[in-house]
Amino acid sequence: YNTLLAIYGRHQQTARVQQLCLEMLETGFPLDLTTYNTLLSMHCKAGDVAQLEVVMEAMHHNRLKPDAVSFNILLNAYCKAKNFEGIQEVISLMQAHGHDADLYTYHSLVDVYS
């Protein structure tokens, strides 16, 4: 399922992604961290920061903790939007969750501040 989600997400086929997520749940396949990161990536590419926040809330509701990939996707989206308050919030959240900045983190920051 996650491979199909990634393909649909890469091509911004949001309706298919939503349909596939519902099908996963209906057939007993819970949405896992990979699924949520795929959703985050799709919304990041679309520049839809509001939906990123919805996905993060759904992760929290389903007791899934974001990983470094999740935070870097969020950071990338806020950097693209030049939302400096959001950038700072993501960095603070990363640190609070015990994730250090990595190459992807620094790359996003260099892009926005250069």
Image (spheres, grey):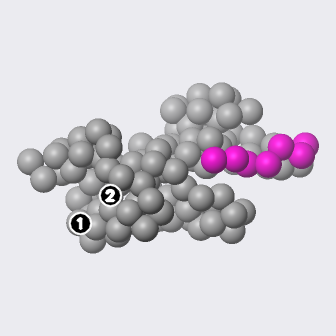
Mark-to-mark CA distance, 2 and 1: 7 Å
What residue lies at 70% left-to-right and 47% top-to-bottom?
32
Q: What kind of residue is marked 1?
A: Phe
Label 1 neighbour load within 10 Å: few <14, some 14-19, many 20+: some
Foreground residue, 91 or 13? 91
Q: Which mark is residue 78?
A: 2
The residue that disc 1 covers is 84
Q: Tell me the magenta residue range.
A: 27-33
Q: Is residue 44 left or right of residue 114?
A: right
| Contact check, label 2 and label 1, Cβ < 8 Å | yes
Q: Which mark is residue 12?
A: none
Q: Is residue 56 left or right of residue 87?
A: right
**Outermost residue, left side:** 114
Element type where label 2 sits in the image: helix
| Image quarter of the N terminus | top right
What residue lies at 38% left-to-right and 63% top-to-bottom?
95
Q: What kind of residue is marked 2?
A: Tyr
Query: Does residue 32 belong to the magenta stretch?
Result: yes
Q: Earlier in the sequence, mark 2 or mark 1?
A: 2
Q: Is residue 31 left or right of residue 49?
A: right
Would you say residue 14 is visible in this rendering? no
Which SS does the magenta portion mostly show? loop
Element type where label 1 sits in the image: helix
From the top left corner, tell me how far across and down residue 86 is, in percent.
32, 67
From the top left corner, tell me how far across and down residue 104 is, in percent.
32, 40
What residue lies at 59% left-to-right and 33% top-to-bottom?
6
Would you say residue 35 is visible in this rendering? yes
Foreground residue, 80 or 67? 67
From the top left corner, tell me how far across and down residue 87 is, in percent.
29, 62
Label 2 neighbour load within 10 Å: few <14, some 14-19, many 20+: many
Q: How many callouts does the rendering have?
A: 2
From the top left corner, tell me how far across and down residue 31 is, in percent.
73, 48
